[in-house]
Amino acid sequence: MNKNTLTINAFSMQDVTIGPKYHLTENSMQIPDHPLFDIDDRLKSVNVKLVDPKDCHFKINTIMDVIPISTKVLGNIGYGMSNTLTGVSVILTGADETGVQLHEFGSSDGYLDEKIKFDTDGTPSSDDVIILIDVILKSDFEFNRETCEMVFNTSDQFLQPIREILKVMNGRDAAESFEYEDIKHPGKPKVAIVKEVAGQGAMYDNMVFAKEPGGIEKGISIIDMDNMPILLSANEYRDGAIHALV
Amino acid sequence: MGIGPSTKETTMHHFHDPLVRVVASDPDVDFQGVILVGTPQDNYLKNLVGRRTAFWLEAMRTNGAIISADGWGNSDVDFMNTMTEIGDKGISIVGLKFIGTQAGFVVENEHTKFVLDINKSKSGTETEVVGENNLSEKDAHKALGLLKLKMRKDGQVTK
């Protein structure tokens, strides 16, 4: 396998519905409205619903993250092949049962259409179907890194069955396919990017090198690496080497 | 102060990162990679991670770098310190971060004028709207353009 090349196959979701179990075809998807696994004792509920960005004037809890759905097919993060879903994205929101919001500095709870700017690199496209995962903690929770990671992990576990089906889908059925190569330009000035990211505590953290693109499982927190600099290739970045925990 | 909703970079933002997209695909530069560095609480560590970043760039024989941050306030210390450490190694450095009307630098130095503001809000503040004040592709192009000029001025490009 050429470790300099990353192929991303994009499957365009035209039809996303709620149903009793997970189902995925090259252009449609069905997901349950709650996790099919036992949720953590600290959680009161996890509710999943589908949202149209063009019609979303309703109240939400603070937006913890916006997550793409992507999975490794061949190789590791940064090379080989990944299958990714387009036309669908995930918003994770969180609070406790009394309305205390899960955030570090400033909350985005309120009306969804007023609290997010769609069509940016970090937010859903206004043509997407949004999978809104709302996690509610019991009121006696402790606001710390472990609790927040558990919440992120819950949404990651909810998404994993989609990745498992996506993983075995044939790239030939993808709507689009992109190939990214690490191209060197000898003789040109050498340029690097330095990205300073959060690494101080609960909802102020980032995770790298999870098993799945934009995933949590096996990820390493930048805090646990004492915030030391690490080098990532452009393809690792494009392949979801980072999961934000901010 | 820290990372507010309008500047925080979501997992989706990293996945589509406009700075990586723009710089990695530019044929006029030899792109080396992304150094990801955290923002510790402790002052000793703040200085250490900045120094380690500069050492890496020097060892990579980097001519120029663009530094970006997703927060402001407390993390400005890390930002300016890392910029200075990189600059002291003779590497051209430009920055991108949220400034607006709310997050100006407390202390200015020779590098502050090479930091571009990524604010997009009319008020220039943390609006608590997710995605509003994120680094965009346009910001990335501006920073790369500025870096190219700075590298020329600093004598990094030999012709």
Image (cartoon, coloured by chain):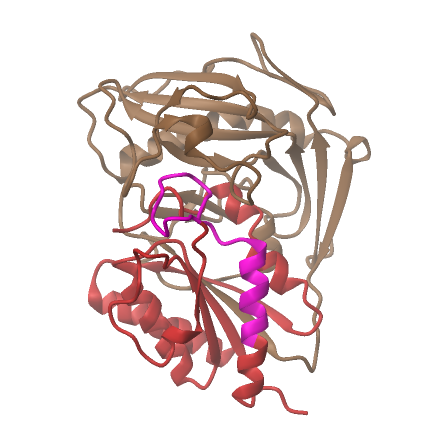
* Chain identifier of the brown chain: A
- Closer to us: B17 or A41: B17
- Closer to us: A59 or A70: A59
| Residue A181 in the figure: left or right of residue B4 | right
The answer to whether residue A90 shows anywhere in this view is yes
Viewport quadrant of the C terminus of chain A: top left
- Closer to us: B129 or B58: B129
Residue B15 location (% of width, % of height) = 56, 46
At x 33% / y 48%, what residue is drawn? B3
Residue B49 location (% of width, % of height) = 33, 68
- Closer to us: A215 or A57: A57
Residue A111 location (% of width, % of height) = 40, 25
Instruction: Work out which residue is located at the far right of the displayed protein and give it.
Output: A172
At x 38% / y 77%, what residue is drawn? B111
- Magenta segment: does it hold A183? no
* Chain identifier of the red chain: B
Looking at the rendering, the stretch of residues picked out in magenta corresponds to: B121-147
- Magenta segment: does it hold B146? yes
Residue A182 location (% of width, % of height) = 68, 62
- The image quadrant that residue A187 belongs to is bottom right
